[in-house]
Amino acid sequence: MKNQKPLAPVLEPETLKKIDLYLEEFYPNAVNAGNEMFSAELGKAQIRGLETLVTSTSRFSEVINYIKNQTGKDKKGKWLQAGPLLLDQLDLLENKADEIGQGDATTVLEIKLRLARGWAKQVTTHYLYSRSQK
């Protein structure tokens, strides 16, 4: 047991602080995404599906692929309205993870996942709040 490695890399406290600070800075973008998803009339189950995927996946690209898949198969245009914005925001998160992680692939992946999970919570919460206000 003493040689057992953690499932995810252990990030330095300074790195965790940078992630939290960036998520706070990024919050208005997440609010905008939640508003857009509400305006597009995406279903609550779809939003929860996205949140569940983001919190359970071990690959950042799986989140991107989920949004592209939903957008591509959407016949009513709801995901077409929100999908590009979500993908743009994930791109910004990915760029920030690259900056914080300084090129170490394992660290960058863990940072991307932490940023995406924080973002997904923010987006979902604001979407649900917007629904309650209608």
Image (cartoon, rainbow, N blue to C red):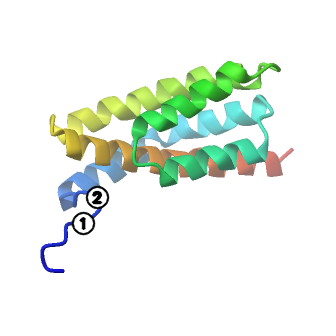
Q: For this rendering, which residue is in front, 17 or 61?
A: 61
Pointer 1 residue: 6
Residue matched to label 2? 8
Three-letter amino acid code of the residue under disc 2: Ala
Asked if 70 appears above or below 53 in the picture, the reply is: above
Residue 99 position in % (x across, y down): 22, 34
Measuring 48% from the left and 37% from the top, which residue is drawn there?
62
Where residue 69 sits, quadrant-wise, is top right
Q: Residue furthest bottom?
A: 1
Which quarter of the rendered picture does the N terminus lie within?
bottom left
Q: Answer above or below: position of 82 versus 33.
A: above
The local crowd at label 2, few if under 14, some if 14 to 19, many if 20 or more residues have their Cα within 10 Å, is few
Q: Which mark is residue 62?
A: none
Towards the viewer: 123 or 52: 52
Q: The residue tagged with tag 1: helix, strand or loop?
A: loop
For label 1, count other residues whose C-alpha is less than 10 Å away and answer few (under 14), some (14-19) or many (20+).
Answer: few
- Where does residue 31 sit, x and y in percent of width and height? 60, 40
Of 26 and 52, which appears nearest the observer?
Answer: 52
Residue 42, located in which quarter of the rendered image?
top right
Q: Hey, which residue is sitting farthest right in the picture?
A: 134
Q: Is residue 106 above or below residue 90?
A: below
Q: Position of residue 78 (x, y in %)?
A: 76, 25
Instruction: Give the quarter of the image for residue 127.
Output: top right
Q: Secondary structure at mark 2?
A: loop
The reply to whether callout 2 and callout 1 are in contact (CB within 8 Å) is: yes
Quadrant housing the C terminus: top right
Give the residue at x 22% y 57%: 11
- Residue at point 45%, 31% (across, down): 90
**What residue sits 24% from the left and 66% below the top?**
6
From the viewer's perspective, tell me whether residue 26 is left or right of residue 77: left
- Give the amino acid type for the residue marked by disc 1 in the picture: Pro
